[in-house]
Image (cartoon, helix red, strand yellow):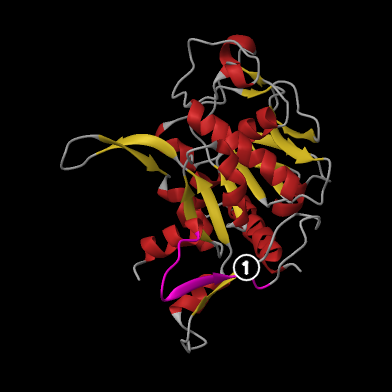
Amino acid sequence: MCFDIFLRRFLTNEPNSNLRFRSAIKRPRDAPNGRRTHRFARSGANRKPDSFYNRLMANPIIGITAQQSLVKSPAGPLPAHVVNKVYTDAVIRTGGTPVLLIPPSHPTQATDILERIDGLVLSGGGDIDPRFYGGKTHDTNYSLDPDRDEFEIALARGAQQRRTPLLAICRGLQVLNVALGGTLIEDIPSEIGSTDHEVRGPSVVDCHQTVTIEPDSLVATAIDQFEACVNSIHHQAVRDVAPGLRAAGWTPDGVIEVLDPLDHGWPLLAIQWHPEYLSVNNDAAALALFSAHVGHARTASTAI
């Protein structure tokens, strides 16, 4: 079976004569994170211990949210769901198996998706529609996608309820804050006056801004440092921190760059910068964030 069909059937639990889904451990619904661990088994097949199949399934499944973009095709430019390769490369490099997540027919299906993955990455992208946090439309708003907003807000809420390991990157941090009841600064340059947060072009793979991080935060624990040199590619930021979260990292101009869960039983790493780009240059802190997330997902997938 080709790999993309395998993953599609994995996410949809679609039946197949050679591949069936079975629950290894059925956890009660009132378990701490409400999750069931799971595995795949081929019917009647004896697999070699070191087969590609076994190696694949030994890695935690990391769902990465996608965004819409036009791509070339024989029919001309067509809309597609895409994820920058730097995300999938970073996940694979640190031991995870990435799958793309796109908005389903209804946001309530987010729960079903969370049951089929071990970890979640809320990726970067365009602005969140201001109506989701009671904000005001701004001239600088770009790439608004309410369907993606609704889906990712549902994923973030479900991840909190289930304690699903979550790595929230840039827009992902903002989605998380909005999902849990927080608000956003609509435009940093016009409100704060700083222009240090929106560097684009080839420089995105290099750090240019310093973030001071609370020593007892999950992010500081993951990267084993209290100060990090980061890249910054955003014009919006957290205004009011949502209940259940706390600000745990700032740039010198006071912009919040790290959110930390009050419940450290939830493995959440929420950052305003882009470690996926920094990982291209082997940035140690960037790779440590992905390694920590994949590690959390591996622990969750094998928990009883």
> In the image, is 302 to the left or to the right of 104?
right
Which quadrant is the C terminus positioned in? bottom right
> Does any portion of residue 272 appear in the rendered image?
no
Relative depth, front residue between 239 and 13? 13
Residues rendered magenta in the picture: 13-24
> What residue do we see at 69% from left, 59% from top?
296
The answer to whether residue 75 is above or below residue 28 is: above
Q: In what element is the residue under mark 1?
A: loop
> In the image, is 271 to the left or to the right of 103?
right
Pinpoint residue 269: horizontal percent, then vertical percent. Answer: 69, 46
Mark 1: amino acid: His
- The stretch drawn in magenta includes residue 22: yes
The answer to whether residue 246 is above or below residue 141 is: below
> In the image, is 12 to the left or to the right of 157?
left
> In the image, is 304 to the left or to the right of 291?
right
Q: Which residue is mark 1?
A: 38
> Does any portion of residue 142 appear in the rendered image?
yes
Pinpoint residue 78: horizontal percent, then vertical percent. Answer: 26, 36
> What residue do we see at 80% from left, 33% from top?
246
